[in-house]
Image: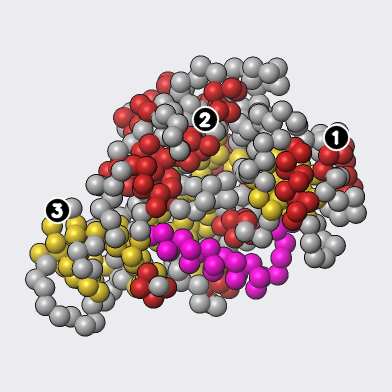
Amino acid sequence: MNIRNATLGSQRVDIIIEDGRIASVLPAVGGDHPADIDAQGRWVIPGLWDEHVHLGVWAQHATRCDVLAAENADEAVALMRAHVAGDDGPIVGTGLRYALWDVQPTMAKLDEVSAERAVVVFSMDVHSCWVNSVAARRYGVVEQAGESGILREHDSFALLTALAQIPDDAMDALIDRVAQSAAARGVVGVTSFEMEDPAHWIRRVANGFDTLRINASVYPDRLSQAIEAGWKTGDTIAGDVTMGFLKVISDGAINTRTACCHDPYPDGSGYGVMNIENADLIDLMSRARDAGIGSAIHAIGDAANTHVIDAFEAVGVAGRIEHAQMVRRSDVTRMARLGLVASVQPKHAVDDRDVADELWRGRDWAYPMASLRAAGVRVICGSDAPVAPLDPWLSIQCAVTRTAGDRPAWHPDEALTIDEALDCSTRSTVAVGQPADLVLLDRDPYACPGTELASMPVSLTMLAGRVTFDAKATA
């Protein structure tokens, strides 16, 4: 299936596709080709990638109560109470963002939602969650939760895993749904970080999943399993699913004050936390290296980024730093020298600006993008869904504008151009020999105001020459 009469830059072109790749890009010649797609002058770009998602958690996001709009604990409780319905199972919420609330969470406060059922509300980044007394007892975390009812880091991750256990067919249906929604936004692939066995993808592909390319990564508890399976980064697991990376969470997050920093938080809560000793991190990364598996290490605070860069240097491999939200300038230089990739989430810079201004006062090296690229660091973009929606156009808009609504741009010197933002959101180009992962747009992205990029209309998405979304078919 070929694409005729598309706009590429300033030219009208025909794109000839053979065996899932672009065989030719020629000046448009017109004519009637019933087996081909007539782009009718629409703009063609490479397929988009979301380089950091938690696909299973994102798939379940729509089934949970969203409390993101809450401005204090009372409002969050009111939203959760309105969500109470049905059986006697746990009541689960998401979108908790309490760092600047005037009324802070307490376990007793969340008991107001239900005194009989477990209630759990996860933060957007799942580095913390809020539990009521029933949940604390049921999951054995009474001591860890304390009076606040807040669990952080490993305790929160463990609870997330426990609550994610649903039947395979139910999870597969949810993943199909979010994959189709992603394709409708021009997405052809994602790097997914899941606390599950990547072998689940063998079943999904056997059952017909073919909507996205998936880089399926593993956490340390699944590393041995991946090594035993013989999966190296880039190897095919099944269909368009490939082995991704070893993911290690080195520190926490800014909203929970657990991102590990060189300087203390201004409220006296300390420096944040490192979730792993560097010797242990180096050992894990070395095991992965020896097995041909790349490393993608979470680091948010500037101290965590320093430690992770140290680990990459010690192991002697390049790799990815996930988030890289606060990186000292000297470490940016080191990242470039070592060939490290910064996997960033532009929407976080917009969402966290007030928290960052409060908790990271004076740190003008927070949420860098332009300065990373200028130093020679490869930058790739993702959403961190469910922390932000799985929609690269939203990320692209945030990267270009560094703001939302009518607010002035936050650190506008770190903004990217539309060319740069698209480069950070794609893995291929519209050129001979490249995968036929293509997107047709109803609007010229280069002429679109930055504040309107998030609503970019996608007409068609193609993966390896196969249509995965067609707006005409859904109209």
Disc 1 on helix, strand or loop? loop
Within the magenta stretch, is there residue 360? no
Q: Which mark is residue 353?
A: 2
Give the number of the mark in front: 3 or 1: 3
For the stretch drawn in magenta, the main secondary structure is helix
**Kind of residue at badge 1:** Gly
In this picture, residue 380 sits left or right of residue 172: left
In this picture, residue 377 sits left or right of residue 276: left
From which residue to which does the magenta span run? Answer: 163-186
Work out which quarter of the rendered image holds the C terminus and state it. Answer: bottom left
Disc 3 on helix, strand or loop? loop
Work out which quarter of the rendered image holds the N terminus and state it. Answer: bottom left
Q: Position of residue 334 (x, y in %)?
A: 41, 27
**Kind of residue at badge 3:** Ser
Within the magenta stretch, is there residue 172? yes
**Kind of residue at badge 2:** Arg
Dot placed on the residue nearer the N-terminal end, 2 or 1: 1
Residue under the point 36% across and 38% down: 400
Q: Is residue 202 above or below residue 418?
A: below
